[in-house]
Amino acid sequence: MITIKDVAAEAGVAISTVSKVLNGYDGVSRSTRDKVNNAVDRLGFTPNAVASALSSKQSGRIALLLKMGPDNSAMDEINMRYLSGAIRSAMDNRLDAVTIMHEMISGLDKEALISYLRSQSIEGLIIFGLNREDSVLLDLISSQVFKTVVVDAPITNRSTASVSIDYAQAQYDVIMRTFENIEGNRILYIAGKDSSYSTSEKLKAIERLDHELGVKSRIIYGDFSELKAREAVFEYAEKSDIIACGSDLMAIGAMRALMELDIFKPVCGFGGVRLMSYAGKQMNTVRQDFENLAREAITLLKDLLGGKEGTAHCAGYELVRMKYADALK
Amino acid sequence: MITIKDVAAEAGVAISTVSKVLNGYDGVSRSTRDKVNNAVDRLGFTPNAVASALSSKQSGRIALLLKMGPDNSAMDEINMRYLSGAIRSAMDNRLDAVTIMHEMISGLDKEALISYLRSQSIEGLIIFGLNREDSVLLDLISSQVFKTVVVDAPITNRSTASVSIDYAQAQYDVIMRTFENIEGNRILYIAGKDSSYSTSEKLKAIERLDHELGVKSRIIYGDFSELKAREAVFEYAEKSDIIACGSDLMAIGAMRALMELDIFKPVCGFGGVRLMSYAGKQMNTVRQDFENLAREAITLLKDLLGGKEGTAHCAGYELVRMKYADALK
DNA sequence: CTGTTAGCGCCTTCAG
DNA sequence: CTGAAGGCGCTAACAG
């Protein structure tokens, strides 16, 4: 293995000088910088990240915490988008991202978790899919031991930032669009989970609709399950004019149920996953750019690691209409 | 941060002794071992993996190479299964897994890639989704610079092992089952990609059917695309008795096309992803246990890192019939 | 602007 | 069976 020492010798300078140019510090003349860079190229030197981490006490390692959830393809699709965005962005930011599934650490208490993360030299965390039931994680966040970015939950403190879209507005928008050309004002809202932060936000949209437009809404918790959404539709569809769902997967379940009942009611979803194309009819949904959300999360984390304070950020979304053709690329 | 030194002091022994019990070496008396372990617990010590890696020159880091492929949920589902299995298993084996997407390194030539992986202190690779067109990776494998396990491609050498299911047999089995109660022997086989190793294997099943049963088969390359499978069906379904597809996604496309044509032909897929439930009718498919495949890959890699030679391994599969209810959990 | 010199935390011979 | 000592490759003051 060829080391910084070899480079120094090759370039005819001191070891620390090499380190400086490698790390982009200033205080090195143009000419020595060139000498060093040439030596690096000539020798095909690549710095040893481990040694660097040990020495600088900065590993640049971050953990991506994903929730796999009960097996379903929609969740997989979303997680994959998150991952893809986060990993790429981490690479661009010279951060070293390891991914961890919630279940892998679900047995640990706060102390054990901290100790585990420390032993992995993890400096920062990005938490996807956090909800109010994740008490250990919530504690971890308040402890402020690690710099963390929470995606889709409005939690911040000095070392915690958050990103998400404006769920209340997005949910409002997609329902409004779905109301176009519809008579009636009874909405069956199939919400996600009580413990989900985004679900609470989305429910604000329903409240707002109630007040602003005198909409009559019935709220059922579908727990993000296709099956439960299906059952809700069997039970309440007749008495509703539109069916709004807190997730695309539930929208699929709802649409399938309607088809079996052989009645038509407009349905809207939330998320914008390709899977939705399989619902059977085209539907409105809110498309979240999951990759971008992850990228923003990385940027925020980088800032936190750089010493900035945590803040809440808002990402964009888009209203779209998905149909089977969307699945065909 | 509390170090091995503190533990040594607390336990009243030398640093090296602590190191030994930590790493499970023998040559330490039962009583000192206990003293050390107690000290570790009392202090809540967790070893610093970075220092350990630097010192031992064994990072225990492996890279998981995933191919995201053109956006589709089936691929996401499979990748997520692979990842989930690999990451968990890596954790159990005290390996540190980082995931890398093929596209992130697609611009690099062999040298640059080696240098990149080296700089990340990566010792081993697990490559998912390799095909004959990935020349840089193929070169990397033959160079034997890293211990690597290839999933789903029969490549081995002294430092390369492989795992996959017996595609030829599995494809044969699922087609045979689909032939049950069907008259006729004309099969439309929608294959994956020419450059895919598993596709070649699956095609052997067709050959075998031709010889053994006098089946008349027409082979079309669908490139794993739902759309292409759909088009193939529009063109050739009438002249076929069953339609066998090299992937579930293509099977979905095929089934949808049949429904639009309003004719019925049995269809079978391959993979066993939940997504298949959305095809519209129940279908036979080969269910691969992707998580397990990944776990086996990790085990093999661990062996390779431990000095064993590379070998080819075979994993199991199962024939199943998927229907919409499967999507409902 | 450049070079010298301590460590970072742990592993690993090699004496004792 | 235990302890002392010398690195691993790099960073970061601190002199020069």
Image: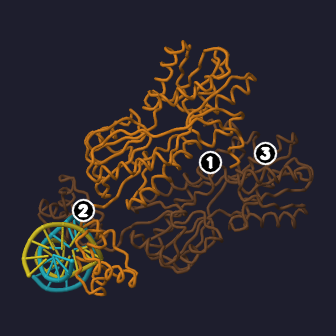
Chain colours: A orange, B brown, C cyan, D yellow
Q: Residues within 10 Å of mark 3 (few under 14, many from 20)?
A: many
Q: Are marks 3 and 1 on the same chain?
A: yes
N-terminal label among 3 and 1: 1
Left or right: A199, with D1 as reference point: right
Chain name for mark 3: B
- 3D distance between C-alphas at marks 2 and 3: 57 Å
- Quadrant of the rendering where the N terminus of chain B is positioned: bottom left
Mark 3 falls on what kind of element?
helix
* Residue A273 percent location from the top left of the image: 59, 41
Three-letter code, disc 1:
Ser
Mark 1 falls on what kind of element?
helix
Chain name for mark 1: B
* Residue B319 percent location from the top left of the image: 71, 51
* Residue B20 percent location from the top left of the image: 25, 69
Mark 2 falls on what kind of element?
loop
Specify the label residue A5 is tagged with: none
Q: Residue at x 34, y 41 (%)?
A: A137
Q: Nearer the viewer, residue A308 or B41?
A: A308
- 3D distance between C-alphas at marks 3 and 1: 17 Å
Give the quadrant of residue B174: bottom right
Three-letter code, disc 2:
Lys
Quick check: can you spot residue B20? no
Q: Are marks 1 and 2 on the same chain?
A: no
Three-letter code, disc 3:
Met
- Quadrant of the rendering where the C terminus of chain B is positioned: top right
Would you place residue A17 above or below residue B32 in this image? below
Specify the label residue B73 is tagged with: 1
Specify the label residue A57 is tagged with: 2
Would you place residue B249 above or below residue A139 in this image? below
The residue tagged 3 is B255
